[in-house]
Amino acid sequence: MEPVAAVAGESPTTDDQAFPWGDVWGQPDAVAVLREAASDPASMTHAWLITGPPGSGRSTLAHAFAAALIAEPGDERAMHQVLAGTHPDLTALRTEGVIISIKDARALVERSYFSPSLGRYRVIVMEDADRMAERTSNVLLKALEEPPERTVWVLCAPSDADLLPTIRSRVRTLRLREPDVADVADLIVRRSGVDPAIAEQSARHAQRHIGMAQRLATDAAARARRDATLRGVLAVRGVGDAVEVAGAIVAAATDDAKALTAERDEAERTGLLRTLGIAEGAAVPPAVRSQLSALEDEQKRRATRSLRDGIDRVLTDLESMFRDVLLLQFGRDTDLINRELEPDLRALAAAWTPERTLTVVDRIGVTRENLELNAAPVLALESMLVTVASGRTP
């Protein structure tokens, strides 16, 4: 199906604030397309793909669309249930593992054939649809091609190129775009009350990813870690430096992942034990240990994904830094992401050739691919940093 372009713009108009679209920011054209589809069966499609870069609001838009589809117009109670994830006619999958498993995909397909129990439609939202392997994607094909009359699929991914052509041919694609740095900074100031200069810096460093910009703006330690990582990479001069900096990056990403997941892990464990009627500190009976083990396995998968995501953010930051070097090498200095490092970047731009900078940028991309193939993070980063030091691929 032909994609529908949606252009990022200013904050939603007063009309766009109508429930449930109020949390969708910076995508008025996309909201208009989906509102029309939800209210007019003639413009409705039963399989959608919402694409846009990380932080563009794909998931928020998908759930707002689900609320508009499921609830009768004006039924804010039902819409609240959908947005909270508690409505029986919504099935949402957001994987916290490395990939979406075939088991999870089959469960979604099975749910898609149930008739709506309370609402107008049954809606299946699959976030991170780009994390499906080919075999998993094939599980969805028939369900997307011939969904029941009152079932709607909404997939989310960074790009339609991240999905198989057979999937793309069965969905209507709605493409989102990133807002400007100034728009993201303004949103963060209004949400968090942070200093406008910090908000602008965070929006720029996050490359307009709203969630990441929010975190940088409100977490001084995260800003300091990012700065230390980039400066550490700039200081790499040999194999010894590469080994030391790679270890530091992985250690920082590991600590960050633990900080993000530890509190949630403990709350889940406590909640499960309470549900099973086991007092805090009491021994776990053998009969229920399998349930606790299953939870621990899921938490380990989530921790692995969180670590991978943390390292991927570092790689994104490094790409932005060497992209800045390339801009300086070609005489452009008005769109630098890492302005705070400009003196160091200018020195590097003068010392390196553009070919060497491109070699490093290419190696960062290869490192990302290797990590997706389960390469050891420390070894993958060491190899990349040797390229930084030498200008040659190991």
Image (cartoon, grey):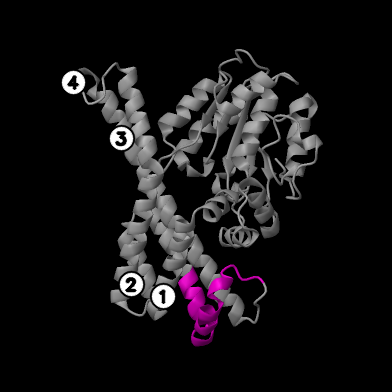
Q: Label 3: how many residues lie within 10 Å, few (<14), some (14-19) or many (20+)?
A: few
Q: Which image quadrant is residue 72 in?
A: top right
Q: Is residue 150 visible?
A: no
| Residue at the image point whose x is 62% and y is 58% from the top | 195
Between the residue at mark 2 and the residue at mark 4, the CA separation in whole angstroms equals: 47 Å
Label located before the other in sequence (2 or 4): 2
Q: Magenta residues: mostly which secondary structure?
A: helix
- Give the structural element (helix, strand or loop) at label 1: helix
Residue 286: mark: 4
- Give the structural element (helix, strand or loop) at label 4: helix
- Disc 1 marks which residue? 388
| Residue at the image point whose x is 75% and y is 20% from the top | 74
Label located before the other in sequence (4 or 1): 4
Residue 297: mark: 3
Start-end of magenta stretch: 335-361
Q: Which image quadrant is residue 164 in?
A: top right
Between the residue at mark 3 and the residue at mark 1, the CA separation in whole angstroms equals: 37 Å
Q: State yes or no: residue 351 in magenta.
A: yes
Are the residues tagged 4 and 1 within 8 Å (C-beta)?
Answer: no
- Amino acid of disc 1: Val
Between the residue at mark 4 and the residue at mark 3, the CA separation in whole angstroms equals: 17 Å
